[in-house]
Amino acid sequence: MLDIADELHRWCEQGRDFAVATVVATGGSAPRQPGAALAVDGDGTAIGSVSGGCVEGAVYALCQEALETGEPVLERFGYADEDAFAVGLTCGGVIDILVTPVRSGHSPAESAARETFAAALSKAAGGRPVALTRVVDGPAELTGRALLVRPDGSYDGSLGGHPELDRTAAGEAAALLDAGRTGTVEIGSDGSRCGQPVVLLVESSVPPPRMIIFGAIDFAAALVRVGKFLGHHVTVCDARPVFATAARFPDADEIVVDWPHRYLDSQELDGRTVLCVLTHDAKFDVPLLERALRLPVAYVGAMGSRRTHLDRLERLREAGVTELELARLRSPIGLDLGARTPEETALSIAAEIVADRRGGKGVPLTGARTPIHHDPAAPAGRIGSVA
């Protein structure tokens, strides 16, 4: 739901009632991931998507029904093999959809839940980290309840029931928020692992992941555009002020004139950060990569020929970088697409970043028997679960 926070925040400010259908869990070749949402207001206006078109009509009807009844509903959609025109996912996947009415003035519980939703939407729309936690399955009296959870584990709202339930749920949600992940967790209704099972959907909204591009060259300009397309907050850093200018990189969120390693030392980075080193100049690359390869970031790639790469490895070894640390380096940067132009090269770099993040192999799908969609962080055997 937080993926359409901007529009839903406006709906809340305008006092509109609406129902929101959120992907809770997926299996197989499902088109959207947990957290994707479709919302419908009282006038029938719809925003968002839960399946890319496969089951939107049926979900739209469920939203209208929930608006009328005020009752949440959990529905599973899968492949319709008996009737190609029946409601189902023709891609062969399975998705669980939670439909929640967000109404005001109907009951104290509904009004309280709406306040929690509105506060979470406000934070997400403002780019502040927040997790919205809802009951997907469990005791009937908990249905429709929600918590707003902050990064420090503090929270607003209540799931009801045992007093320890909120604290345990907030702790679980804070852990997922810290990782920037959306998914389901199961806890006991008394806040332990022993009570009646309660399944929670935790939706995390975090600031965009960072892409820092070192080297203000023509290839960097193309990579900035691709990085923005992928949803990154993109910074270009170069020690040469004549090259690191807004005129050359109009699409960048930030342009920094500084020595790359010094700028890197000044930053607080997380596990979603992508570092792309395009300078292929040893006086910049070696001190920068010496630091970058020891940071808990998602990706470190460096541009250069194979000869440059081998020379760079030797210099890094001399600087004390271990073989284990060197194994993290993606160099020469990018996948083998036969790229020549800056735009093609940027595409090959972006493809490697996505494959690395999603667990893909970078091989053609034609003739392959591997899954189309990967989630390396999710354990096998349970749809939508999060370890």
Image (tube, helix red, strand yellow):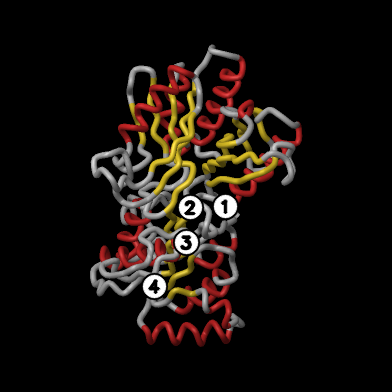
Q: Residue at x 44, y 65 (%)?
A: 359
Residue count near mark 4 (Cα–Cα under 10 Å), binned few <14, some 14–19, many ≥20: many
Q: Which quadrant of the figure has residue 159? A: top right
The label nearer to you, 1 versus 3, is 1
Reply above or below: 377 against 120: below
Name the N-terminal-most of marks 4 and 2.
2
| Residue wearing tag 4 | 333
Q: Name the spot of residue 324 as percent of width and height, x first.
A: 58, 79
Tag on residue 209? 2
Q: Is residue 16 visible?
A: no
| Residue wearing tag 1 | 386
* Labelled pair 3, 2 in contact (Cβ < 8 Å): yes
Name the N-terminal-most of marks 2 and 1.
2
* Labelled pair 4, 2 in contact (Cβ < 8 Å): no
Q: Residue at x 43, y 73 (%)?
A: 302
Name the N-terminal-most of marks 1 and 3.
3
Q: Name the spot of residue 349 as percent of width and height, x first.
A: 36, 66
Q: Which amino acid, mark 2?
A: Pro
Q: Residue at x 31, y 45 (%)?
A: 80
| Residue wearing tag 3 | 274
